């Protein structure tokens, strides 16, 4: 069975797309820790990040770096934090979260943002990518 992320890659489920290339996709988390919280995934369905071969892993991290740099330019934050948890969706993914303090990276505190705000944030990051 395809993961929800594979269904997003296939266009079966909409997303707030931030960046894309032939092997990777970045989109806003619909239950963000902070406004601009972005998920970076390989388009190829791989359950666990550390199951990726070295080339796929490095390629994903380099893509995530470019997304984080765009987030730095587009969002008011001191840093973009990276986290790998991977328990909710069986598809390798990296969380990029704009933060101002270490306490901002709290995955037990999720936000619900209006669609218009999500669209605006995604567009701002995409414009910097």
Image (cartoon, rainbow, N blue to C red):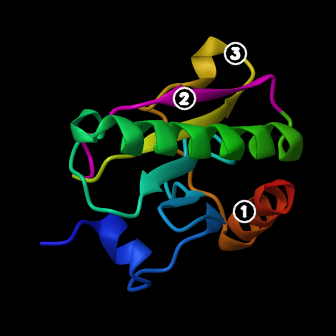
Q: Quadrant of residue 51?
A: top left
- The residue range painted magenta reads 77-89
Q: Quadrant of the C terminus?
A: bottom right
Q: Which residue is the site of mark 3?
A: 101
Residue 77 coordinates in the image, percent (x, y): 81, 30
Instruction: Residue 61: say if magenta.
Output: no
Q: CA distance from mark 2 to mark 3?
A: 13 Å
Per the model, the C-alpha gap separating discs 1 and 3 is 22 Å
Q: Secondary structure at mark 2?
A: strand
Q: Nearer the viewer, mark 1 or mark 3?
A: 1
How many marks the image carries: the answer is 3
Residue 127, x across and y down, in percent: 85, 62
Image position of 76 with respect to 104: above or below:
below
Q: Is residue 78 magenta?
A: yes
Disc 1 and disc 2: Cα gap in Å?
A: 18 Å
Residue pictured at 86% horizontal, 36% vertical: 76
Give left or right: position of 80 versus 55: right
Q: Quadrant of residue 114?
A: bottom right
| Residue beneath disc 1 | 122
Q: Which residue is mark 2?
A: 82
């Amino acid at each position: 069975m395809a993961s929800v992320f594979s269904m997003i890659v296939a266009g079966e489920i909409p997303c707030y797309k931030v960046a894309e290339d032939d092997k990777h996709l970045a989109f806003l988390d619909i239950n963000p820790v902070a406004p601009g919280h972005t998920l970076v995934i390989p388009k190829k369905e791989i359950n666990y990040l550390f199951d990726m071969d070295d080339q796929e892993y490095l390629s994903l991290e380099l893509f995530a770096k470019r997304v984080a740099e765009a987030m730095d330019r587009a969002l008011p934050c001191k840093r973009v934090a990276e986290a790998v948890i991977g328990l909710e969706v069986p598809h390798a993914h990296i969380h990029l979260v704009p933060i101002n303090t270490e306490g901002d990276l709290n995955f037990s505190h999720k936000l619900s943002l209006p669609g218009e705000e999500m669209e605006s944030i995604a567009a701002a990051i995409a414009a910097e990518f």
